[in-house]
Image (cartoon, rainbow, N blue to C red):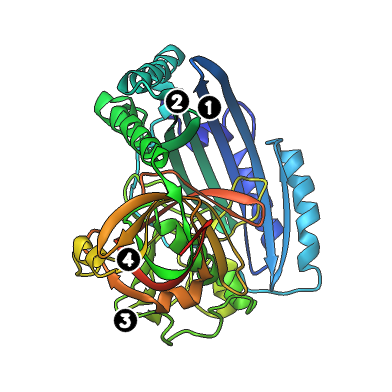
Amino acid sequence: MTTAPDDLFFSDGLLDRSQTEKLVGETLNGADDGELYLEYRQSEAMSFDDGRLKSASFDTMQGFGLRCVSGETVGYAHASDLSKEAIRRAADSVTAVKRGYAGTFAGAPRRTNAHLYTDANPLAAQSFEEKVKLLQEIDAYARALDPRVQQVSASLGGEWQAIEIIRPGGEILRDVRPLVRLNVAVVVADGARQESGSHGMGGRLAYDHFISPENWQSGVSEALRQALVNLESVPAPAGEMDVVLGPGWPGILLHEAIGHGLEGDFNRKKTSAFSGLLGERVAAPGVTVVDDGTLSDRRGSLTIDDEGTPTSRTVLIEDGILKGYMQDRLNARLMGVAATGNGRRQSYAHQPMPRMTNTYMLAGERDPEEILRSVKKGIYAVSFGGGQVDITSGKFVFSCTEAYMIENGRIGAPVKGATLIGNGPDVLTRVAMIGNDMKLDPGVGTCGKAGQSVPVGVGQATLRINGLTVGGTAAA
């Protein structure tokens, strides 16, 4: 099913387009920026656990957010009531920020002909019964792979979001965004010991890709493989040692450790560890980091951001030199630079702010095997779970869900309970070798900031980082 945003917001007497455009123009006259953001979203989620369907939900939401920007001050009002009266009440509230203020309204975002993903609704392509059958098949397949499998959890989720952005002068920008995700978790046991493994995949696609047996079966096998590896794990050592990060999902460490520090708002306010360092060396030679929202079908990609600006490939660090920040319209205007298409919001009920899309480090020239052989004693981290970072200091802590000892250049025993502790800007200077095997994550990332969550992507090649602190329970 494909429905145009105009049919969603301006049919059946919900709103009158000419009246709405006139109200937006009157509200934002004399302000520096702002827009009316209209959103319609359908979402569903199903989880299968312990041999039965545990939960299933379907939700439809719609609403608007009206923003008026004067200088650094933002007036924002939102409601789920799509009516002329509700928007009028919101207008009365947000215009308070421009009283006594005479601004010059910012120019409209440039147009784009890019079309990064389908506008078809993934929720409508398969029946509820087909989706439940998929989860049942995942459960049965995992249990048949190995008798040590004790528990299987599988979840399927998707959404279809349509947005329309109205600016003064009848400037209209639209986007229709699908998003799906499949997750599998497996618990295995050997005697009294139990361990788990998981794998997820997703993107701005239809469900067809993941319902294909070769795809979901590979995901189940990967979750089981990780669980069996962890079943053989020994306590992780503690101390300072060299660390090799695997390609793909370990880029989440890069995302958290330095990505947030390169968002425009933190740098405008000078609360980032990277504030004031444009043009200076902040990383080892060879380190190039980009944020790219233009990749087709990727979880973090957007044709336009939530202010209407087309996303872009923004070079943040080039060969170790800090080149730029990720910008929304407000912070870009105040910093005297161009917006980069990174103005994102969780929903109509949230204000946009600078956020990452797909953030990754470009590949180097080293063979991954060469990188591993170069380490006498260290940790090889393949997958991460939770982590946290302090934006101002850059300090981070990350837990490994799959990691191994490296001994005399060879991968050794798997380890359990390893955490990586460090400082983002410092870690960038400790990158000693960059592999030629860069890849993106499988499409499962979600980023939190200021109470808002948005889908993102990460990626990197195999990396060697010298002298990183590893937390564990065994002596190094």
**Which residue is denoted by mark 4 in the rendering?**
463
> Which residue is more in the foreground, 315 or 100?
315
- Count neighbours of disc 3 (C-alpha within 10 A) and say few if under 14, some if 14 to 19, many if 20 or more: some
Instruction: Give neighbour class at mark 1: few <14, some 14-19, many 20+ (Cα, 10 Å).
Output: some
Q: Report the Cα–Cα distance between label 2 and label 1.
A: 7 Å
Marks 1 and 2: in contact by CB < 8 Å?
Answer: yes
Element at badge 4?
strand
Q: Nearer the viewer, residue 443 or 218?
A: 218
4 or 3: tag closer to the N-terminus: 3
On the image, the x and y values in percent for residue 258 come to 49, 69
Q: Name the residue tied to disc 2.
A: 123
Could you tell me the amino acid type at mark 4?
Leu
Can residue 341 be seen?
A: no
Task: Give the mark, 1 or 3, whose residue is nearer the N terminus.
Answer: 1
Total marks in image: 4
The residue mark sitting in front, 4 or 3, is 4
Marks 1 and 4, how far apart in space?
37 Å
Observer able to see residue 329: yes
* Between discs 2 and 1, the one toward the N terminus: 1
| Residue picked out by circle 3 | 285
Against 83, residue 213 (above or below) is above
Residue at 31 percent across and 56 percent down: it is: 247
- Which amino acid type is marked by label 2? Leu
Pointer 2 or 4: first along the chain: 2
Spatial distance from mark 3 to mark 2, Cα to Cα? 46 Å
Spatial distance from mark 4 to mark 3, Cα to Cα? 13 Å
Residue under the point 35% across and 30% down: 220
- Chain-order first, disc 1 or disc 4: 1
User: Closer to the observer: label 1 or label 4?
Assistant: 4
What residue is at 70 percent from the left and 37 percent from the top?
80
Q: Nearer the viewer, mark 2 or mark 1?
A: 1
Q: Where is mark 1, residue-wise?
A: 44
